[in-house]
Image (cartoon, helix red, strand yellow):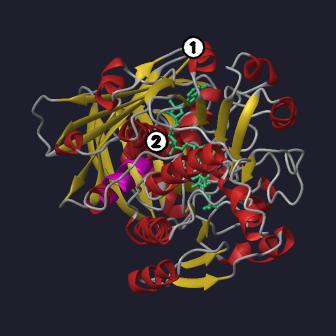
């Protein structure tokens, strides 16, 4: 197998290059590419490793014909168009914990810097002014810290702040009472945080709900003398309002690591008194950069080389241990999906995927996604394993996954049923020898067949003479039969033939097959 090629387009620790190489990937390190330069070369790569500088836009993804994975060495993925990546089947992963401590420490550092005006005092002292009376600070002990967002970073900030003897309030709609109690924080509404906090720090992602969460109106609800820290994302806080309130003295100090537009070469906040700024340094420690570089390189290599998925934002996780076990089932699930999809000519209303035996004990999410992809692909070229669930949702297809605990004749079975307005059809398969996909049942009729490249699916009335007529017709058209499998519900009832042939079946020949006596339906299937 050729080595997967990975591009690192941001300043990642050299540890990432070592890991990619050790794991068997070819790696190019080209930080600082301009968007046009990235678009020009991205077509060569299966993996793209980034931090926050590279913008993985829909335009970049459109050129990324071979791309399988984008790995964010860090947390925020707002620089990646996840919807466009999903539509193209590109897995997006991040490293959600690698820089959390470092960023929480930066938030605490900004709180101290703002409370004691350290940058200004430093500049004044080094300018020989010795302004001892100018810099009157505020203690953190026994003050109230209001957190907006109490996830990975917010909860570490809470822990450190409690260590500093602060009282901590947290506004986070997804924070459970139990977790709040474990952390020792008081759950609060946003208004309670605004009204009671001496310090407010934000730790949410930037979403439609959190955008401008510290708006001018909300900032006006805060206590006079409040200090604000944004070490999460630009856009969470109204920068112009903070400037005005710093100037008026309502806000006593503000610490900003992130800005609405980055790199922030200029900003409305700059030059305002009692403001401390850093250039998005939250994650910039040796320790955090080693962590995220190592993690992203391991995660991306694992995905490219084994199919293991960890910390993905658009795919279910598959552990490195599960990946090899799942591989043959992925093949089976995709083929069953494709089989059912190729037999479906009308609108699909529902798809059900049932698992029985050993396969039911595995992580079935990826299997269901690949089965769904197989079902939808004959109708939609752009469907892939990553976007299949979203496409099914958009089309109103009801997807059900069922695990059965009952015993079966096979060590594992996957049954896929497709419901349209007219009927529900099912196809069931298993693995022979642990790796060879086989069909074992179609529409409740037992049949045993492999999936071949060119296949004929025929339903017919179970009457003498059919096999001879079909064999003669194929022979006349120089089509060689590789395998021939038959099944029927009752003698003289409905029968199914699955015929694997060595040559493709032309539309003309298919019409003749369909016209043979006792044939009900004939279809060409390809795998
Ligand atoms: N400055 C930096 O260098 C730096 C470094 C790392 C992370 N970050 C940023 O820090 C932020 C937090 O990261 P994290 O790892 O803690 O993320 P996280 O996902 O662990 O936590 C985010 C929390 O925000 C909460 N939340 C979501 N919507 C909310 C809302 N409307 N109101 C209140 N809370 C809401 C969530 O419930 C969650 O608990 C992210 O924006 C991330 O990009 C910045
Ligand atoms: O979301 C993150 O992980 C931080 O914003 C860090 O960004 P960086 O990797 O560009 O420093």
Residue at x-position 49% and y-position 36%: 517
Residue 311: say if magenta: no
Residue at x-position 55% and y-position 14%: 189
Residue 42 circle label: none
The secondary structure type at the circle numbered 1 is helix
Left/right of residue 19 with respect to residue 27 in the rendered view: left
Q: Residues within 10 Å of mark 1 (few under 14, many from 20)?
A: some
Q: Residues within 10 Å of mark 2 (few under 14, many from 20)?
A: many
Q: Nearer the viewer, residue 423 or 33?
A: 33
Which region of the structure is painted magenta?
327-335
Image x and y of residue 286, in percent: 49, 72
SS majority, magenta? helix
Left/right of residue 398 with respect to residue 490 in the rendered view: right
Residue 106 against residue 42 in the figure, above or below = above
The secondary structure type at the circle numbered 2 is helix
Q: Nearer the viewer, residue 294 or 494?
A: 294
Q: Nearer the viewer, residue 57 or 223?
A: 223
Residue at x-position 20% and y-position 59%: 434
Residue 491 shows in this picture: yes
Indicate the quadrant containing the N terminus: top left, top right, bottom left or bottom right: bottom left
Which of the 4 quarters of the picture holds residue 321?
Answer: bottom left
Which of the 4 quarters of the picture holds residue 220?
Answer: top right
Residue topped by disc 1: 192
Image x and y of residue 287, in percent: 44, 69
Tell which quarter ligand 1 is in. Answer: top right
Image x and y of residue 379, in percent: 65, 40
Residue 33 against residue 285 in the figure, above or below = below
Q: Nearer the viewer, residue 36 or 522?
A: 36
Residue topped by disc 2: 157
- Of marks 2 and 1, which one's residue comes earlier in the chain? 2
């Amino acid at each position: 197998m050729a080595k997967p090629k990975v591009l690192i387009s941001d300043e990642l620790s050299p540890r990432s290059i070592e890991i990619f190489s050790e794991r068997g990937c070819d790696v190019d390190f080209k930080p600082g590419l301009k968007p046009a330069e990235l678009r020009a070369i991205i077509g060569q790569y299966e993996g793209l490793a980034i931090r926050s500088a590279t913008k993985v836009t829909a335009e970049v993804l459109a050129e990324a014909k071979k791309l399988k994975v984008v790995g964010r060495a860090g947390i925020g993925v707002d620089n990646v168009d996840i919807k466009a990546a999903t539509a193209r089947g590109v897995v997006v992963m991040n490293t959600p914990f690698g820089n959390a401590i470092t960023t929480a420490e930066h938030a605490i550092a900004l709180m101290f810097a703002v409370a004691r005006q350290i940058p200004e005092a430093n500049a004044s002292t080094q300018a020989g002014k010795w302004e001892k009376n100018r810099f009157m600070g505020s203690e953190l002990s026994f003050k109230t810290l209001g957190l907006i967002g109490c996830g990975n970073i917010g909860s570490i900030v809470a822990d450190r702040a409690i260590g500093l003897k602060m009282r901590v309030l947290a506004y986070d709609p997804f924070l459970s009472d139990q977790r709040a109690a474990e952390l020792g924080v008081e759950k609060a509404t946003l208004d309670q945080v605004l009204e009671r906090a001496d310090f407010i720090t934000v730790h949410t992602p930037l979403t439609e709900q959190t955008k401008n969460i510290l708006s001018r109106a909300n900032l006006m609800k805060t206590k006079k003398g409040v200090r604000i820290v944004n070490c999460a994302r630009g856009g969470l806080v109204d920068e112009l309002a903070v400037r005005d309130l710093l100037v008026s003295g309502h806000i006593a100090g503000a610490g900003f690591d992130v800005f609405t537009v980055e790199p922030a070469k200029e900003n409305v906040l700059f030059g305002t008194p009692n403001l401390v700024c850093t250039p998005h340094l939250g994650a910039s420690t040796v320790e955090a950069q080693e962590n995220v570089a190592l993690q992203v390189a391991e995660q991306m290599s694992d995905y490219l080389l084994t199919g293991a998925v960890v910390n993905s934002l658009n795919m279910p996780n598959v552990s490195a241990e599960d990946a090899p076990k799942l591989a043959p089932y992925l093949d089976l699930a995709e083929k069953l999906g494709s089989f059912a999809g190729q037999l479906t000519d009308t609108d699909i209303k529902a798809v059900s995927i049932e698992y029985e035996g050993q396969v039911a004990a595995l992580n079935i999410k990826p299997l269901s996604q690949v089965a769904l992809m197989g079902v939808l692909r004959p109708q939609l070229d752009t469907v892939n394993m990553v976007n299949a669930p979203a496409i099914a949702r958009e089309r109103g297809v009801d997807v059900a996954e069922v695990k059965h605990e009952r015993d079966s004749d096979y060590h594992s079975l996957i049954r896929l049923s497709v419901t349209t307005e007219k009927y529900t059809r099912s196809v069931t398969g298993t693995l022979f020898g642990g790796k060879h996909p086989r069909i074992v049942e179609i529409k409740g009729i037992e049949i045993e067949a492999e999936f071949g490249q060119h296949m004929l699916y025929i339903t017919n009335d179970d009457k003498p003479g059919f096999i001879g007529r079909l064999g003669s017709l194929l022979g006349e058209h120089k089509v060689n039969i590789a395998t021939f499998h038959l099944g029927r519900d009752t003698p003289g009832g409905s029968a199914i033939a699955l015929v694997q042939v060595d040559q493709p079946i032309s539309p003309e020949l298919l019409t003749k097959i369909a016209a043979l006596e006792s044939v009900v339906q004939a279809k060409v299937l390809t795998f």
